[in-house]
Image (spheres, rainbow, N blue to C red):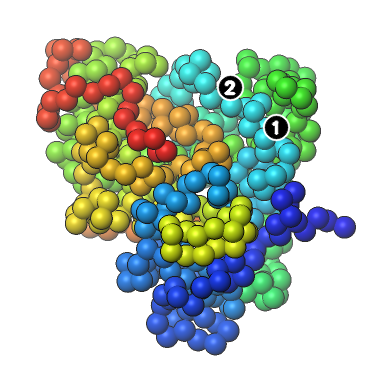
C-alpha cells in the first residue's frame, strides 16, 4: 500500500487549511460565500491567480478563500512572509498545484516532499552544476542558442513581420537548458510549430491547473478526456527523456547536469540517483528550467517596448560595458547592473512562479497573531507581496527598475522580493536563469529597437506559471554602436555599485 504520510508523520497531498488554523474564523474571506461551493461567485477558472490578487487588495495580508468545501489561506503581508521564511519553524509545503505535477515529476527537486531522500541526494549531487565554474562553462552554449534567436528575428525583420515574443522565448529557453544541461537539441527554431515536447509540457501544466479548479469528487468524471490526454502527454515526456538518457549512457557528455546525474555519487554517503529519479530530475529541469525564464524574458521585453526611455538607458549600458566586442564574455554579463534591474522589476510585477506554500513544522503563532498547528500551511502570494504599497510605495503598480538600485534594496526589509521561493527549497537554478536572461536582454537591446503594437493591452495567461498572452513586437535594426567602450557614459544617476547585485540577508 502507498504511504500516505511523510517521514515527519504529516499527511501527504491536499489537506483543508481549516484543519491547522484554530482561529480560522478570524480571517476575512470574500463576500457572498455559498454553501459547499464557497467563494466562487465572480471567480475565473482561467485566471485564478489574478482573481486572488483582486481579493487580496480588499481583504488584507492574511485571508482565506473556500472552494468546493476546502479552505485555502493566503498570506502576502511583508511581516507575515518574513516570519514564514524562518526555516526553524516552517518548511516547503507541496501544495495542491505542485502535488498535481507529481504524476510527471515525482520526487524531482521541485515536487519532492521535504523528507523524501531523493531530494537531498539530488540537491547535493547537482548543486556543483550551478557553481561559478560550471556557469562559465554554460556561457558559450547560451550565446550559441541566443544566436539562433537573433537569426530567427533577423529573418522576421527582413520579411516585415512582428515576432511572437512568448513563443520565441520559450524556444530559446528550452534549447538553452536542453543543450547546457543535457547536450540535446530540440531544433525549436527550425520548426514552424512548437516542438511536441513543449506541447506535452503545456498540456501537463494546463491539466494540473484545471485540477485546481474542479472539485476532487467530480474531477474523474468531468476531466475524463483531459485525463487521457494528460496520460499521453506524460508518456511522451517520459519517452523523450528516456531516449535522451539512453543515448548519453553510450556516449559520455562534457560534464553537464546529465553527466552529474548519471556518474556522480553523493560525497558523503556514496549513493547515486536511480534511473527513475534521473528521468524525473531531467523532466523537472526541462520544464521548470525553461517555462519560468521564458515568461520573465517576455514580461521584460514587454515593459522595455512600452518604456523607450528605460530601454535607451539599458541599451546605453550594454554599449558601454560590452563595447564593440562581438560576443560578451561571462564576466561582462554580471556588469549589466541596470539591465538586471529591468529583469528584477519585471519579476517583481509578474513573478512567473507567482506563489509558494509553507507549512509549520511545529505548533507556532504566525507573526505573533495567528496560531498554526503543526502541518498547517499557507500559500504565499508572491505577486501581491511584490505589490505591497507599505514596501514598494504608493506607486507599486508602476514599472521602475530603480527600485533595485543598491540603496533602495538596502532600505527594504528582507524577504520582500521572492521570485525564486525561499529557504532550502528555493530554486536551485536561479543563478542560471538570471545569467541567461540578463545575457539575452543585453543581446536583444544591442541589436534591436523594440516597437510595441499601440493597441496591445497586457493580458496574462496562467498555467501554474505566468506568461504574457499574444505579445507581438515589431523590430527595428540598430546600427552598430560607434565609439563605445568601458569609459562610455551611461545615462542615469551615477552610482558606485559593488561587483555583485546587492541583496539583503534572506533575499
| 95 over 123 or under it: above or below | below
Circle nearer the N terminus (2, 1): 1
Exactly how many numbered labels are in the figure? 2
Q: In the image shown, does 417 or 261 lie closer to the viewer?
A: 417
Q: Residue at x 54, y 87 (%)?
A: 35
Mark 2, Cα crowd under 10 Å, few <14 / some 14-19 / many 20+, is some
Q: Which residue is mark 1?
A: 121
For the residues labelled 2 and 1, the Cα–Cα distance comes to 13 Å
Q: Residue furthest right?
A: 1
Q: Residue at x 37, y 40 (%)?
A: 297
Q: Which residue is mark 2?
A: 128
Quadrant assignment for the N terminus: bottom right
Residue 351, percent across and down? 40, 48
Check residue 381 in the rendering and tell me which mark sits there, or answer none. Answer: none
Quadrant assignment for the C terminus: top left
Mark 1, Cα crowd under 10 Å, few <14 / some 14-19 / many 20+, is some
Residue 355, percent across and down? 47, 54
Tell me if residue 445 can be seen. Answer: no
Compared across the picture, whether 221 is left or right of 81 comes to right
Amino acid at each position: 500500500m502507498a504511504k500516505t504520510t511523510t517521514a515527519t508523520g504529516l499527511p501527504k497531498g491536499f489537506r483543508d487549511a481549516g484543519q491547522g488554523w484554530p482561529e480560522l474564523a478570524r480571517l476575512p474571506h470574500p463576500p457572498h460565500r455559498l454553501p459547499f461551493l464557497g467563494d466562487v461567485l465572480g471567480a475565473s477558472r482561467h485566471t485564478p491567480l489574478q482573481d486572488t490578487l483582486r481579493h487580496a487588495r480588499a481583504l488584507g495580508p492574511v485571508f482565506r478563500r473556500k472552494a468546493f468545501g476546502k479552505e485555502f489561506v493566503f498570506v502576502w503581508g511583508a511581516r507575515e512572509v518574513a516570519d514564514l521564511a524562518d526555516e526553524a519553524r516552517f518548511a516547503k509545503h507541496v501544495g495542491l498545484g505542485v502535488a498535481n505535477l507529481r504524476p510527471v515529476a515525482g520526487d524531482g527537486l521541485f515536487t519532492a516532499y521535504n523528507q523524501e531522500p531523493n531530494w537531498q541526494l539530488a540537491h547535493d549531487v547537482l548543486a556543483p552544476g550551478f557553481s561559478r565554474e560550471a556557469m562559465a562553462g554554460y556561457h558559450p552554449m547560451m550565446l550559441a542558442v541566443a544566436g539562433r534567436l537573433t537569426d530567427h528575428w533577423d529573418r522576421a525583420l527582413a520579411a516585415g513581420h512582428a515576432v511572437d515574443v512568448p513563443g520565441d522565448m520559450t524556444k530559446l529557453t528550452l534549447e538553452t537548458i536542453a543543450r547546457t544541461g543535457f547536450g540535446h537539441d530540440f531544433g525549436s527554431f527550425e520548426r514552424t510549430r512548437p516542438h511536441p515536447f513543449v506541447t506535452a509540457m503545456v498540456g501537463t501544466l494546463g491539466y494540473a491547473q484545471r485540477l485546481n479548479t474542479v472539485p476532487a469528487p467530480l474531477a474523474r468524471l468531468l476531466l475524463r478526456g483531459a485525463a487521457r490526454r494528460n496520460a499521453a502527454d506524460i508518456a511522451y515526456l517520459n519517452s523523450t527523456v528516456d531516449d535522451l538518457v539512453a543515448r548519453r549512457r553510450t556516449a559520455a557528455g562534457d560534464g553537464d547536469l546529465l553527466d552529474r546525474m548519471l556518474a556522480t555519487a553523493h560525497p558523503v554517503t556514496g549513493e547515486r540517483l536511480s534511473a527513475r529519479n534521473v528521468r524525473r530530475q531531467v523532466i523537472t529541469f526541462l520544464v521548470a528550467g525553461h517555462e519560468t525564464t521564458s515568461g520573465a524574458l517576455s514580461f521584460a521585453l514587454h515593459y522595455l517596448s512600452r518604456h523607450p526611455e528605460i530601454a535607451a538607458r539599458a541599451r546605453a549600458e550594454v554599449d558601454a560595458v560590452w563595447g564593440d566586442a562581438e560576443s560578451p564574455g561571462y564576466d561582462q554579463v554580471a556588469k549589466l547592473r541596470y539591465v538586471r534591474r529591468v529583469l528584477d522589476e519585471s519579476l517583481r510585477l509578474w513573478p512567473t512562479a507567482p506563489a509558494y506554500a509553507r507549512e509549520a513544522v511545529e505548533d507556532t503563532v504566525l507573526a505573533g497573531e495567528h496560531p498554526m498547528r503543526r502541518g498547517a500551511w499557507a500559500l504565499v502570494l508572491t505577486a501581491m507581496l511584490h505589490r505591497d504599497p507599505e514596501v514598494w510605495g504608493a506607486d507599486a503598480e508602476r514599472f521602475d527598475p530603480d527600485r533595485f538600485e543598491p540603496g533602495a534594496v538596502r532600505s527594504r526589509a528582507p524577504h520582500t522580493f521572492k521570485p525564486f521561493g525561499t529557504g532550502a527549497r528555493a530554486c536551485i537554478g536561479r543563478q542560471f536563469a538570471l545569467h541567461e536572461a540578463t545575457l539575452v536582454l543585453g543581446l536583444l537591446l544591442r541589436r534591436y529597437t523594440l516597437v510595441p503594437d499601440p493597441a496591445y493591452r497586457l493580458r496574462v495567461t496562467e498555467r501554474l506559471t505566468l506568461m504574457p498572452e499574444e505579445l507581438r513586437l515589431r523590430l527595428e535594426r540598430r546600427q552598430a554602436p560607434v565609439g563605445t567602450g568601458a569609459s562610455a557614459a551611461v545615462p542615469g544617476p551615477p552610482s558606485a555599485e559593488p561587483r555583485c547585485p546587492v541583496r539583503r540577508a534572506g533575499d
